[in-house]
Amino acid sequence: MAQNVSDIQPTYSLQQIFYGAPGTGKSHEINRLTEGKNVIRTTFHPDTDYSTFVGCYKPHMEETDMTTVIGETLKIVRDEKGEPQQEKRIVYKYSCQAFLQAYIDAWQQPEQEHYLVIEEINRGNCAQIFGDIFQLLDRNEEGLSSYPIKTDADAENELRAVFSEKWNLADDKAQETDNLYRKHYPNGITKDIKNGSLLLLPKNLYIWATMNTSDQSLFPIDSAFKRRWDWKYIKISEGRDADTKELLNWLVRFNFMDEEKQYTFECSWWEFIKAINEKIASATSSDDKKLGYFFCKPKTKGSKEIDSETFVGKVVFYLWNDVFKDEENLIFKVTEGKANPSFDAFYTENESGKTIVDTTALRTFMHNVFGEQSDLYTETEV
């Protein structure tokens, strides 16, 4: 016999935010935990609002009967056989977005767990995006919303139509749910959920999110919102293969010229992360801007090498622009005779005029990062 929503005991926290430094594997952790589950994923950004998260009217192209006006009468245009002729027109229909899609699926499939995953939750204005849905985030001991809310008219019509076609909540389970809210809804609450007039989160709907601590100044999350979530910190650690759990052992590797000889610089990506994170913590007195292991990856699948182009374009640029932007830091002093460091110093031109990484400057940068710890890298003549 299939389980129903009232039988399911939440496996994890119903609402939690996975947070930590960029590149620590927050999304990967969610993917691991939700493997084989029903997942709807969305990403917040500065232009995300209530309508793009919950639902709104959108234009759709569909075939409709062709019409024409004869006198003051609108008539359908028919072919020689008397059949209505079709034409494509833009019509406006209510479109359920990520929240309502997950909400509908959870009520229609009460025997299954459903996950609404919000990436980069603090890159959007949560107060504006959630609106009155914020009230639903208060869950009772049963995992249902403590305080149902009135649905807006447009969403109500859509939910009524959807649930009239499919509604799998068994009568005895509906009765159990009704009893939980009998004090305020003496005639039962599930009929109002089914007809779309009330919104109430079921216990099989999980809302999980990721948050980079380095981005928390974009749209600060207020304390009232924070209290509705559990917070799971993803610490910076050495990367492992998702299947074998073995250490990845990625390397930063590039060639450079010194006194007309070519050398190969090589260091452990993990050793670099530890070294640079010490400097970040010292300069910012915070963990927010530190690097996680997956902040930068080898270009080619199966490779262990992070090349100079990837390293400078992603790592050095991030450090220059986002971490040490407002202060001078000697790790960027890579050019002799120049008083002030310059990001431009990390690039040069080849014989054909193409912009390439100046690996000699990059080598100096790495020396500045590692300092006296020369045992953490090797330089081998090619």
Image (tube, helix red, strand yellow):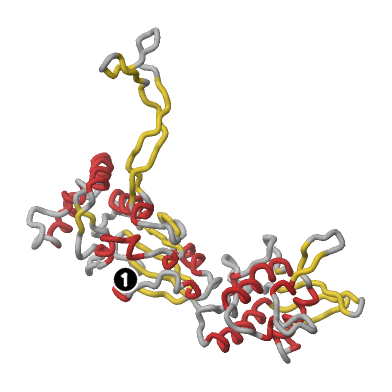
Q: Amino acid at mark 1?
A: Phe
Task: Pick the residue in front: 189 or 370.
Answer: 370
Q: Position of 179 compared to 83: left or right?
A: left
> In terms of image quadrants, where is residue 116?
bottom left
**31 above or below 64?**
below
Task: Give x and y (percent) for residue 122.
Answer: 42, 68
Task: Give x and y (percent) for residue 108.
Answer: 29, 48
**How packed is label 1: few (under 14 Cα within 10 Å), some, or many (20 or more)?**
some
> In terms of image quadrants, where is residue 253?
bottom right
Q: Position of 7 compared to 62: left or right?
A: left
> In terms of image quadrants, where is residue 45?
bottom left
Task: Give x and y (percent) for residue 356.
Answer: 77, 65
Task: Pick the residue in front: 47 or 268.
Answer: 47
Task: Pick the residue in front: 351 or 374.
Answer: 351
Task: Give x and y (percent) for residue 283.
Answer: 57, 87
What's the residue at 33%, 39% (across, down)? 93
What's the residue at 28%, 19% (across, down)? 74
Residue linked to disc 1: 225
